[in-house]
Structures are given as C-alpha cells and as structure tokens.
Amino acid sequence: MSNYRPVTTTDTGMTAPSDEFSQSAGADGPLLLQDHYLIQKMAQFNRERVPERVVHAKGGGAYGVFEATEDVSQYTRAAMFAKGKRTDMLVRFSTVAGELGFPDTVRDPRGFALKFYTDEGNYDLVGNNTPVFFIRDPQKFSDFIHSQKRRADTHLHDNNMQWDFWTLSPESAHQVSFLMSDRGTPYTWRNMNGYGSHTFLWYNAAGEKFWVKYHFKTEQGIRNFRLDEAAAMSAQDRDFHLRDLHAAIKGGDHPSWRLEMQVMPFADAADYRFNPFDLTKVWPHADYPPITVGRFTLNRNPENYFAEIEQASFEPANFVPGIAASPDKMLQGRLFSYPDTHRYRIGPNYLQLPVNRPKSPVHSYNKDGAMRYANPGDPVYAPNTAGGPAADPEVWKGSEYGVAGEIVRSAYTLHADDDDFGQPRALWQTVLDDTGRDHLVSNIAGHASAPEVTAETKSRVAEYWRKVHPELGARVAKELNGA
C-alpha cells in the first residue's frame, strides 16, 4: 500500500498552511482575521446544511437500470418503453412526516421517487408505497402536513392533531386504512411496492390517448413489521432501512421491482363509475387488469450521500414525449410545488447538479442565477435569426385534450359510485386476513389512545371507522373505551 498522501488545499486549490493550528498573534495571543484558511473552513461548515425537505426529509437511495420487457407502443410513444430499451435511473425512498433524524421504521407512508435518465430528457415519477393518498385537492395539502408535524406551542408531535384532521376529512379513510395496517411499517424498502399513485396520460405515435396508473411490484416479496417489531427496531437502529439498502447492494443482492400498468381507454373516464382522477381511489383490477411493462434493478450505491441523494430533485412535471399530466387535482398542484421547493432548497440552478442533470443534450434560453456554470451563450432569446434552438411541438402531439367549464371552487363532479368509505371497506372485508384485521384494530386504537387525544376526538375516531365498516368501528370503540 502506498504511503503517498495528497497535500491539503483550500477550496481554491491553494496549499493549506496547517491542518491543526490557527494563525495567532504569538502562541498565546488572539487569532487573526487574516487567517483565510480558518475563515473559509468555519464559514463553509456553517453552511453545510441546506434546508431539509418539508416532507420526505429522511431517506436513502441508489442507482439502477430500467428495462422495458414488453411492447407497449400501442399505448405510448415514449422511447424508454420501447421493448428491450435500458435506461439508467435513480431511486429515492423516504419517510414522509418525520425530520432528518427520525427512525426509519416509524408508522408512516414511504416515498418512492424515481428519476429516469432517458434519451429524451429526464422523466420523474414521484409516488409512495401506497396507491392512494389522504386528500384529493392540493388546497388541503399544507394543512394536512401541518397536522402530521409538530405543534406550534410545545413543538411536540400530537396524535390528536392527526385524528382531528383525518376525521374531519372523510376522503382520508382509504389511505389511513393502509397506514394503520401493517403496510404502514414495511420491513425494508426492498420489501414494499411502489406506486405512481396519480393517473397519467399516455399517447402513442398516432396520437391515440390512454389513462394509466403505475404499479412497481417488489420481487423480494412483501414483508412488514408488526407494531412491536417496528418500535423495537426504532430503538435498536434508527437507520435500519438506510443501512439495509446500502448493505444489500454492496453485497451484490440487487433489489428489483416489476412495473405493471393499468390502462384505461381515454373515453372510459367520462362515465366511469367513480372519478378515475381521484387520488383517494384505486382502479379495480377486475376493470383494468395490470399488464407487465418492464422491471428495474438497483445495482449501485451513491458515493456521496449529500451530493447524490440529499440534493437529488424529483418533480412530476418532468415528462417525456408520450407521457403527460391528467386532470388529477393533486397532480396539478404538484406540477408547480415540486420544482418551486427545489429552487428554494437547493437553488435556482438545481438541474445543473450532476445527479439532476439530464444525460440528453440541453438547449435552453434560461441563463444566469446563483451557481449557474453552463450558460447558453448567444442568442439568449427566442425567436431569433441567430441560429438558436427552436421548439418542436410535433413530439408532443397527442398530449392535448379538450376541457371546458365554469370557474369554480368545488369537489370533483360526482360519479355514480363516488364514496369515501367504499374502497377502505373493501380493504377490510376482502384484502386483509383475520390477522391483518386484528392488527389494523390494535394499531388504530393504540395510535388514538395517546394521552393527548381528547375524548371528543376518540368519539369521532370510532364514528370514522364505523362508516368504513360497522364491525371495525365497534372494535375500535371497544378498544378506545377500554384504554
């Protein structure tokens, strides 16, 4: 092994004067402001942290490759889905409500964000390990997150706030059912499914349109902690999920997920039995059976967590030709919210960071701003006669569709089977087994029995679950009354 050690330098490359001692007026005298190296080290240290994500603060991730294994050209013109095509990618898993230091195994949804470095630009898919969400309108999003975070007065987490919000928002029942089941405490990131959750638009080369949903099925098998096991692991290893993913990939045990798509003909949405763009609903597989499209494998750990994971940015607005947004209101809100938070958190030129930079060429008229190092050069405006880049609307033909209506503030137009409690009722009746139902009851009752949860809130909790199913509500009420 070589004894060679490089010489320490400042960030400008200048040889550092000392790794141990500051410059002072005599050995026992005051330090000098002219000690540039000391000032640089202290100033840089003071700025080591960027603002943590408001949600999904703690997480981990890895690089991998997606391979399209089936021909779906009848549904989308996206080049990454051409059969046999391999696309490099990055995945970030996360908890949702907790801060950076939170234990990995607490009860919480898990973020499941994917970045595909396609030949046509970056394509981001930002989902969770559940196919639904707590709300259907972004107007309530910040309020929902505030209810899951810390109180303003005591700075403590408060289960009463959570149940207060949930019981006053009946659309939350489906997601809360998932959360309070054992799916709320996955054993590892490798042992959970991921979902795009939203409805998206696919269109093919002929301009034919389809509504779709993404399902990433773990090939490691579903495995969850029981509540007591999750709590024990929180005490034993706060970074269990982070450690598990890194160790598995380092040891050559590369996790993989199979991509299945539900595809709805464009015209079906108008008179489907419930609103297909409602993020609190799933599409029954009997109506739209999933089809296998491809699979991805994670095979490389990041070399620098801050540079490659903490500064990674994912945004639902990053589409490629063949894929577009739907009228899903939550998706519409996220199209703005995600890039806006990246500009605040990591700067206006976050897309020039290596982890976020596309592998395809960039020809943009955007310029300047903090930390920009690749300016476009002249011309810096469009239209121009100086040979600058020109847009190509042809590649997006097929993404357009007609919309009309009065300007209103209202819920979605009701469909025949729109109901906030029908799908969680089906989860209770047909998806969970007896053990799963027992765990759901005990998890709900334990969470709602926290000391800060008021008697009035507990009463509403019981009524909330009665609307899902009378037996479930009765069992929850019995547990709460005996708490």
Image (cartoon, rainbow, N blue to C red):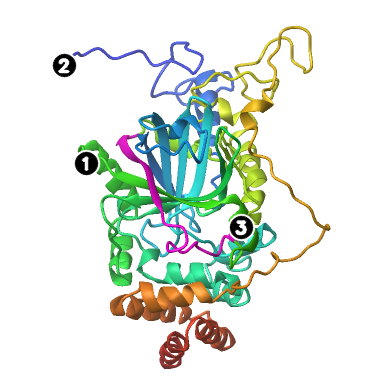
Alpha-carbon distance for marks 1 and 3? 41 Å
Q: Amino acid at mark 2?
A: Met
From the image, tell me which residue sits under label 1: 253
Mark 2 closeness class: few <14, some 14–19, many ≥20 residues within 10 Å: few
Mark 2 vs mark 3: in front: 3
Q: Residue at x 51, y 21 (%)?
A: 360
Q: Residue 364, percent across and down?
A: 66, 20
Decide which of tag 2 and tag 3 comes sooner along the chain. Answer: 2
Magenta-tinted stretch: 276-301
> Does the image show residue 419?
yes
Mark 3 closeness class: few <14, some 14–19, many ≥20 residues within 10 Å: some
The reply to whether the C-beta atoms of the residues labelled 2 and 1 are less than 8 Å apart is: no
Q: Which mark is residue 78?
A: none
Determine the image quadrant of residue 95: bottom left
438 relative position to 116: left or right: left
Looking at the rendering, in which quadrant would you find the C terminus?
bottom left
Between 419 and 344, the one nearer to me in the picture: 419
* Overall secondary structure of the magenta section: loop
